[in-house]
Image (tube, rainbow, N blue to C red):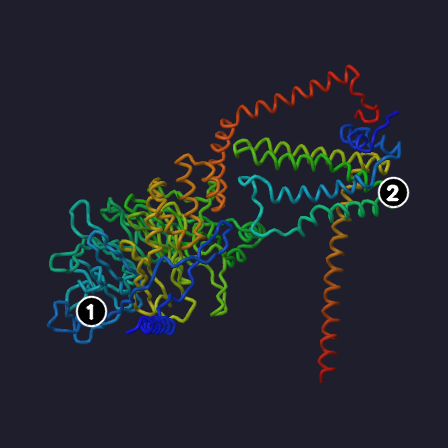
């Protein structure tokens, strides 16, 4: 059957939405370094979209640049997606391992990243009257990535189509739960920190007498 | 005297002079507020003062003491009130350069010239009226006159005075006689038509258009201004506000379906808020302000003769008036101010001044509703000049702005600073489309305030007119004006393509040739690609 280089396998998955991921699974291919690179590129795409979109199109609040929301929007969301999907699907007869979910999800994101870069470039060249092209390209990227993601999850867990969709909706809910708990935990630790710091200052005052 | 001694002397002199200049205390009267403006992100940013407070005028400056002076032509009586009291309206008669003050608390109208020297006091109108007739003088006296409007009639060429005589429930149309008295022409009283459903008729503001149709803002009538024709008949309502669709209104509409009649009667009704004040410009457009409106809904409207709002945010434009945030925090009084636009005035150039009763700020806009400047305050102690207690009305004459205060009983005069003058000149030219002519003025403005957004838009449009597209792009970027940037970019791109057309074609051709050569070489087997790398 097929023999591809690492990048060749990525191409194969993207351009063969129907059986690409099945082949990937069959051949036990897929590279972690490439996946990490894709996630980093996703983050870069978010930053580029925020900063370098053509002036007429850029409706972001660019007065201050804060990288944290962009980091959350890309890397944190991706990791919660993977964790949530793994946590949910292990309970529901999914065959995907953590590593496999990570790789497949990352591969599925490539069209979205590429189209984001493309629309950023176009937004620097086109005027508002021609904005239809940019809209088309961003929707194309998003739609393609969603289709790939469904196929990737189906191949990873060996689910039926319907079950895949249900599991994905479930994953989104799990993501919300994880993020909610994370926020809760962070605020809890912050209070703990404040408490300890207060005790520390108190002791300091006592010692000084 | 040796040269050395001379040098010493000069040095000492210079030193003393410089020391003196350092030691002088710079005493100047600053405005009791910080000037600010809004940037493209609708965030307040500091700005230069466009207006300065030059004087405050009380009854004394007007010369109301003459009312007690038997030798004066304006003599009324020995115990006449010589101050203003709760004045509700100020009107400037542009043609005659005169001001008319509705001295509400003293039930009289005062007429002064542009230097605020007394020209006349009117306690009532002569003529056949049966309302509130004074047995002694035979005049029909005013009671709480709250609004005044003066216009030279196009029919008779006489000076016609319209007075919203609140407590007497009438609008008085009177002419100014040669003897400096008011003679009644017509009284507009409560319409008897079925269309007028209110039980009271308490007019608070009045204007008249060129055809002498009279419009009156009547307290608790929320269906618009009450409109009368020239002959005195009631013709209907004009330019009502809308009900803003908020979550509360929707919820109430749903609750009404289930509630009993008694409950419905107890509910707050979803009715539009009445507008508070209005003004009419030379072209006959009527500008209204609504106190309860917020920045996006009907706070300021520009109505055409059919009562249609030209500054309608629902048609895709964005007009914002007053402070953009819904509530302004005041750190001095420790409370939140809501916007309460109470008066509007439009001058000959189409500049609008909108007065906010809550914050005491005057917002000045050009005729296309671009913010020019903000001045005045209520937040610091009201004893200072330029800060108000009850700012009731705003007027303009030329570039000057006048605000009448009903609690401090004075009129504050604002005159332009150099910055303000430059802005006005620039904006005037800009609004006429003379972008290039406005550039030197914009430069002066920017020398004084580098954050003045409209200046960059103006400079950008001038560059665009002169076909200097890249420069225009830079200016629009500074102003954060995306739409104009887009227009300029269209031309800049065209220019770029025209200038570099050959280069672009050559690059594309070279790339195509390279690809073809590669394909040929692969086919001939000169370049070998490994099967694994093929895809």
Total tally of numbered discs in the picture: 2
Is residue B260 left or right of B187 when viewed as pictured? right
Give x and y (percent) for residue A132.
Answer: 58, 31
Residue B63's disc is: 1
Q: Nearer the viewer, residue B253 or B504?
A: B504
Q: CA distance from mark 1 to mark 2?
A: 94 Å
Chain of residue at mark 1: B
Q: Nearer the viewer, residue B323 or A79?
A: A79
The residue carrying pointer 2 sits among few (fewer than 14), some (14 to 19) or many (20 or more) residues within 10 Å by Cα, namely few
> Quadrant where the C terminus of chain A lies?
bottom right
Q: Residue at x 76, y 60 (%)?
A: A185
Is residue B508 left or right of B219 when viewed as pictured? right
The secondary element bearing badge 2 is classed as: loop
Q: Is residue B18 above or below residue B471?
A: below
Chain of residue at mark 2: A
Q: Is residue B466 above or below residue B164?
A: above
The secondary element bearing badge 1 is classed as: loop
Give x and y (percent) for residue B484.
Answer: 46, 39
> Quadrant where the N terminus of chain A lies?
top right
Q: Kindly indicate whether the residues beneath marks 1 and 2 are on one polypeptide chain.
A: no
Give x and y (percent) for residue A24.
Answer: 85, 32
Residue B513 lies in quadrant: top right
Residue projecting furthest to the top: B524
Residue B526's disc is: none
Q: Is residue B192 visible?
A: no
Is residue B379 left or right of B68 when viewed as pictured? right
Is residue B240 left or right of B141 when viewed as pictured? right
Residue A97's disc is: 2
Q: Nearer the viewer, residue B100 or B177?
A: B100
Residue projecting furthest to the front: B2
């Amino acid at each position: 059957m097929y023999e591809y280089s690492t990048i060749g396998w990525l191409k194969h998955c993207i351009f063969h939405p129907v059986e690409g991921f099945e082949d990937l699974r069959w051949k036990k291919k897929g590279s972690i370094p490439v996946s990490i690179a894709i996630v980093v590129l996703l983050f870069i795409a978010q930053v580029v979209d925020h900063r370098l979109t053509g002036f007429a199109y850029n409706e972001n609040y660019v007065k201050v640049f804060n990288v944290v929301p962009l980091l959350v929007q890309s890397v944190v969301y991706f990791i919660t997606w993977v964790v949530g999907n793994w946590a949910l699907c292990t309970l529901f007869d999914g065959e995907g391992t953590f590593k496999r979910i990570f790789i497949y999800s990352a591969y599925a994101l490539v069209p979205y990243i590429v189209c984001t870069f493309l629309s950023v470039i176009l937004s620097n060249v086109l005027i508002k009257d021609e904005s239809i092209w940019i809209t088309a390209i961003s929707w194309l990227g998003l739609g393609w990535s969603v289709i790939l993601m469904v196929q990737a999850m189906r191949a990873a867990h060996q689910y039926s189509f319907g079950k895949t969709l249900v599991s994905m909706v479930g994953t989104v809910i799990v993501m919300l739960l994880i993020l909610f708990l994370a926020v809760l935990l962070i605020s809890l630790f912050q209070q703990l920190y404040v408490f300890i710091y207060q005790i520390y200052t108190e002791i300091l005052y006592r010692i000084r007498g | 005297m040796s040269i050395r001694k001379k040098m010493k002397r000069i040095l000492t002199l210079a030193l003393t002079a410089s020391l003196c200049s350092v030691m002088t205390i710079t005493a100047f009267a600053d405005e009791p507020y910080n000037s600010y403006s809004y940037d493209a992100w609708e965030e307040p940013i500091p700005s230069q003062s466009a207006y300065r407070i030059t004087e405050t005028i009380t009854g004394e400056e007007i010369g109301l003491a003459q009312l007690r002076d038997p030798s004066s032509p304006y003599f009324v009586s020995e115990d006449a009130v010589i101050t203003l009291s709760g004045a509700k309206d100020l009107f400037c008669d542009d043609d005659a350069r005169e001001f008319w003050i509705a001295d509400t608390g003293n039930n009289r109208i005062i007429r002064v010239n542009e230097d605020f020297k007394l020209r006349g006091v009117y306690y009532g109108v002569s003529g056949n009226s049966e309302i509130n007739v004074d047995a002694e003088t035979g005049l029909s006296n005013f009671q709480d006159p709250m609004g005044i409007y003066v216009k030279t009639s196009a029919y008779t060429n006489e000076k016609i005075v319209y007075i919203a005589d609140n407590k007497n429930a009438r609008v008085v149309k009177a002419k100014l006689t040669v003897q400096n008295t008011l003679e009644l022409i017509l009284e507009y009283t409560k319409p008897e038509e079925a269309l007028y459903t209110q039980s009271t008729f308490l007019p608070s503001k009045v204007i008249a258009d060129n055809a002498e149709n009279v419009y009156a803002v009547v307290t608790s009538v929320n269906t618009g201004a009450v409109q009368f024709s020239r002959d005195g008949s009631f013709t209907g309502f004009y330019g009502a506000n809308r009900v803003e669709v908020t979550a509360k209104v929707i919820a109430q509409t749903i609750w009404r379906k289930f509630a009993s009649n008694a409950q419905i009667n107890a509910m707050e009704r979803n009715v539009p808020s009445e507008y508070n004040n209005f003004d009419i410009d030379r072209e006959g457009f009527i500008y209204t302000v609504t106190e309860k409106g917020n920045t996006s809904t009907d706070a300021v409207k520009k109505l055409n003769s059919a009562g249609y709002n030209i500054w309608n945010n629902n048609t895709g434009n964005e007009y914002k008036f007053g402070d953009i945030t819904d509530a302004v925090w005041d750190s001095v009084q420790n409370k939140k101010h809501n916007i309460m636009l109470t008066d509007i005035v439009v001058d000959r150039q189409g500049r609008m001044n909108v007065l906010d009763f809550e914050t005491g700020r005057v917002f000045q806009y050009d005729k296309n509703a671009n913010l020019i400047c903000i001045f005045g305050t209520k937040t610091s102690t009201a004893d200072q000049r330029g800060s108000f207690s009850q700012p009731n009305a705003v007027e303009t004459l030329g570039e000057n702005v006048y605000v009448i205060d009903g609690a401090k009983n004075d009129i504050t005069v604002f005159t332009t600073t150099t910055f303000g003058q430059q802005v006005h000149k620039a904006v005037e030219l800009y609004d006429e489309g003379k972008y290039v002519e406005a550039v030197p003025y914009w430069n002066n403005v920017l020398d004084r305030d580098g954050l003045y957004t409209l200046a960059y838009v103006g400079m950008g449009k001038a560059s665009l007119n002169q076909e200097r597209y890249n420069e225009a792009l830079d200016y629009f970027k500074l102003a954060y004006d995306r739409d104009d940037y887009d227009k300029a970019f269209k031309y800049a791109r065209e220019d770029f393509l025209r200038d570099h057309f050959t280069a672009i074609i050559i690059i594309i051709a070279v790339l195509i040739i390279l690809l073809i050569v590669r394909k040929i070489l692969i086919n001939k087997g000169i370049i070998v690609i490994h099967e694994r790398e093929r895809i």
